[in-house]
Image (cartoon, rainbow, N blue to C red):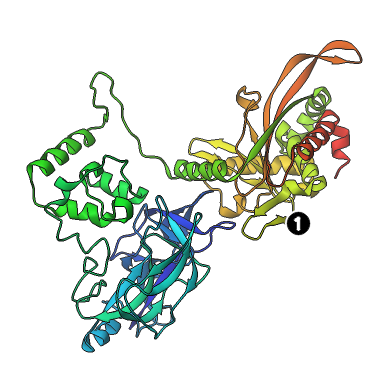
Amino acid sequence: MSEKYQFKLPDIGEGMAEGTVGEWHVQEGDTIKKDDDLVQIENDKSVEELPSPVDGTIDKILVPADETAEVGQPLVEMTVADGLGNVDATATPATKPAAPKQDDNSAAGQDIYEFKLPDIGEGMAEGTVGEWHVKVGDTIKKDDDLVQIENDKSVEELPSPVDGTVLEILVQPDETAEVGQPLVKLSVAKGLGNVSGSDTTSTSAPQPHAASTNDTNQTAPAQADHSVPVLAMPAVRKFARDNDVQLTAVKGTGRHGQILKSDVEAFMKAPSSDTVASTTSNETASAKPAPVSADSAWPTHAEKMTPVRKATAKAMIKSSSEIPMIHLFDEVNVDKLWDHRKKYKELAKEHGVHLTFMAYMTKALAVIMKEFPVFNATVDMDNHAINYRDYINVGIATDTDRGLFVPNVKHADSRSLFAIAKQISANTAKAKDGKLSADDMGHTGMSITNIGSIGGGFFTPLINWPEVAILGMGKISPEPIVENNQVKIAKVLKLSLAVDHRIIDGGTAQRAMNRLKELLVDPELLLMEG
C-alpha cells in the first residue's frame, strides 16, 4: 500500500510570497530519499536548494522550471509509504488525480469548469481576491458577478463566463493569485467543462479567448495586425521565444488584443501557409545560431542569466520602482581609525581575526541604527504603518563570481569588534563557496555596500528592499583638508547614504550621517558604545 504526498513551496525567506523554480533535480518516475536535493527555488534575495522531506517516487511535477509558484502551492506529487501521505486518498487516487469527482459529475451529466484569473489590465501579473459573491453550493448564471479582484491600479468585478454550481473556491479573500491561476471550480453542463477528463478541454466555448481559438487556427496568422505594440505577458513572450514563434505574427484574442499562451499554441498548431512558413523560417533562422545579430559584420550573442543574476535583477527593479530614494554624500577624516586598525591588526591575527575597516563600519552603523530606529524599520503602505525591528542585524553586500549576496552580522550592536570581524570573514567565505543559507541573509535591518575596495568613490547605491536605507563605503585616499585653519594631508573616506524618503527625511538622514562621522573620526569613542 502507498499514499500520496504533495510537497508545497515553504516560506524560505523573510516576507517571501512566491518563488521561481530554477531547476528540478528529479524527473517523473525517479525515486528520492529524505533530505536529498529536490528542487532549486529562486526569490528576490537568494537561490535555495530545497530537500525532500520524505522518501518517495516522483509521480508528477506540478510547477515546471522557470515558472513561479506562491508559498503553499504544491510543487510536486509523490508516492510515499503508508502513514506519510498528506493528500486525501478519496480526492486523489494513485493514477488519476480528482478522477472520482469528475466521474461523479459525468454520471450526473455534468462537467468541471475552472475559472482562471484573466489579465484585467495591461501588464497585470497578479491580483488579490477582494470579495466572493458566491459560496460553495450556490448556483450562478453566466455574466452574474462572481468575484472582486484588486490590483495595483483598480478594483474589478469579474462575471461568471458560464452557468454552473460552485464546487470549490480555490483562492480565499485577501489572497493573491497570478494571471492564469484557477480561482474557483464550477460544475457545468455537459460539453462546457475545461478540466482534463471532461468531454471538452480548456478550449471550449466558456473561455472568452479560447472560444475562437480553434475556429481561427488557420486564419489567425494572416489576420494578425500589430500596428500598435504587441501586448503579451513575460511568460507568454518566453513561451514564444522557446518555440521560435514571432509574436508579431500571432493574433491575440485577449483583452485589448493581448496575446495569450493559447494564441501562441494555436499558431503553432495551424496548418502551414506562405505567411506562416516565411515568418517562422525567418524567425528560426535568426534564433538558432549563437550570434543573434542580423548583420554578420557586427555579431552579437546571448547568454542566459544565472539564477542569482535573475534574482538580483528582480530585487533591483522592485527597489527602484517602489522606494523613493534620496542620496547624501559626505567624507570623513579617518587618520585615527587607520592608525587604530594598524595598531591592532597583528593582535587580531593572533586571535584568528582578519581586522578590516568593514568591521569598524559595521560597529558604527549598529550604533546609528540604535540611536535612529527609523533606519532599522520597514514600511507597510497597505496599513499605513512603520514596523520597527527590535534587533540590529547589519547586512554586508558581498561580491562573488556567482553574483551579489548580502549576508548579515546578527546582533551587531552587542558584539565586540573582533567578533564582528570574525563573522564578516565567515560570511564572506560562505558566500564565495556558495554555502550561504536563507538564515545567513534573513532579517537584515540595514546594509553596507563597499565599492572603495576596488577604487570607487561616491556612488548612488540602491536600497535592498524591504530595508529603508543603505550605506555606501568609498575609497580611503590621501587628500588635502583644512584643520585649525591649516591645510594638511589626511586619509579621507568617501561615504554615500541612500534613504527611503517615505519615512526618512533629509534632515534625519544628515543628522545620522553626522553622528556616523563622529564615530569614525574617533575609534575610541566608537568602542565605548558597546
Q: Is residue 407 above or below residue 203?
A: above
In the rendering, at what x and y percent does residue 508 appear? 78, 40
Looking at the image, the residue that sits furthest to the right is 484
User: Badge 1 local density, few (<14 within 10 Å), some, or many (20+)?
Assistant: few
How many discs appear?
1
Looking at the image, the residue that sits furthest to the top is 487
Q: Is residue 404 above or below residue 87?
A: above
Left or right relative to 98: residue 467: right
Q: Residue at x 28, y 51 (%)?
A: 259
Looking at the image, the residue that sits furthest to the front is 143
Q: Is residue 54 visible?
A: no
Q: Residue at x 69, y 49 (%)?
A: 445
In the rendering, at what x and y percent does residue 517 appear? 81, 31
Where disc 1 sits, the SS reads loop
In the rendering, at what x and y percent does residue 352 appear? 71, 38
- Which residue lies under the disc numbered 1? 390
Quadrant in which the N terminus appears: bottom left
In front: 204, or 75? 204
Left or right relative to 465: residue 230: left
Q: Is residue 381 visible?
A: yes
In the rendering, at what x and y percent does residue 400 appear? 53, 36
Choose top left, top right, bottom left or bottom right for residue 65.
Answer: bottom left
Choose top left, top right, bottom left or bottom right for residue 310.
Answer: top left
Left or right relative to 378: residue 438: left
Left or right relative to 359: residue 95: left
* Amino acid at circle 1: Asp
In front: 306, or 414? 306
Choose top left, top right, bottom left or bottom right for residue 225.
Answer: top left
Quadrant in which the C terminus appears: top right
